[in-house]
Image (cartoon, rainbow, N blue to C red):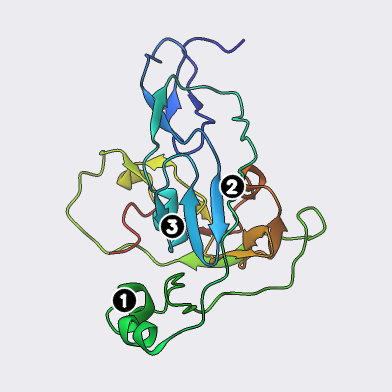
Amino acid sequence: MEERGVKVRCQRIGCDAVFSEHDNPDASCQYHPSGPIFHDGTKEWSCCKKRSHDFSLFLQIPGCKTGKHTSEKQVIAPVKKNTVPAPAPASSTNASSKDYCSRCRQGFFCSDHGSQGKLVEKPVNVAGDATSETKNVVAPKPPKKIVDINEPQICRNQGCGLTFKEKDNHDTACSYHPGPAVFHDRMKGWKCCDIHVKEFDEFITIPPCAKGWHNADPGS
């Protein structure tokens, strides 16, 4: 049993908050109760059907259920995939409509028109077989902006998610994945450290392989 004053990280998927047993009210945790679906470049939460093509944005989709935080690892039920019928042969009308489809114009997979964006394919190494060391890849220092050096911020670098203060930030403060994430043939992994696994809960626990600055706004 953990001490009531000790803060630990919530193990529910989509939460990642730090809590203590004496400060854990109902509905304080916002999480995803079921696992994700990866199909043709699209990432989707099976519980709330929200999706994204970008993996970083996908992980930032807020949880769709609330409850209490927990330090016990969340058990994800297998996701049943619906069989998708093969697309009908493209017609001249289909080709014309692709010009007005935002997904086709951006190169993303489109089930309506059969277009396919570029996928990252990588020879697979199962986690545990690879002998990876922390790479000397340093994340660039985030652009300077007006911020209270004592204000807690959440690092948005892939694989980090820690809360930090700017006064404690430095060039090796953050452990992260420079990426990108790779999803291919039911395997999930990181191109940066060449580690791939089958289960999503194993994927999100792959240790980061690079050091750098914490960054609360990587897209800036």
Ranked by sequence position, the earlier of labels 3 and 2 is 3
| Residue at 41% in and 79% down | 107
Q: Nearer the viewer, residue 193 or 110?
A: 110
Would residue 59 be found to the left or right of residue 200 on screen? left
Locate residue 121: give its quadrant: bottom right
- What amino acid type is highlighted by mark number 2? Ile
**Residue situated in front as seen by the camera: 181 or 151:** 181
| Farthest-out residue, left | 146
Q: Is residue 45 visible?
A: yes
Q: CA distance from mark 3 to mark 1?
A: 24 Å
Q: Nearer the viewer, mark 2 or mark 1?
A: 1
Q: For the point 49% across and 57% down, which residue is it?
A: 43
Report the front residue among 159 and 126: 126
Mark 3: give few (<14), some (14-19) or many (20+) Cα within 10 Å: some
Q: Which image quadrant is residue 20 in?
A: top left
* Residue 172 in sight from this viewpoint: no
Q: Earlier in the sequence, mark 2 or mark 1?
A: 1
Residue 101 circle label: 1
Near mark 1 (Cα within 10 A), the count class, few <14, some 14-19 or many ≥20, is few
Marks 2 and 1, how far apart in space?
A: 33 Å
Q: In the rendering, which numbered label is found on residue 56?
A: 3
Question: Which amino acid type is marked by label 3?
Answer: Ser
Which secondary structure lies at badge 2?
A: loop
Residue 15 on image: x %, y %: 44, 35
Residue at coordinates 34% horizontally, 82% vertically from top-left? 98
Pointer 2 residue: 204
Q: Residue at x 52, y 64 (%)?
A: 178
- Image quadrant for the N terminus? top right
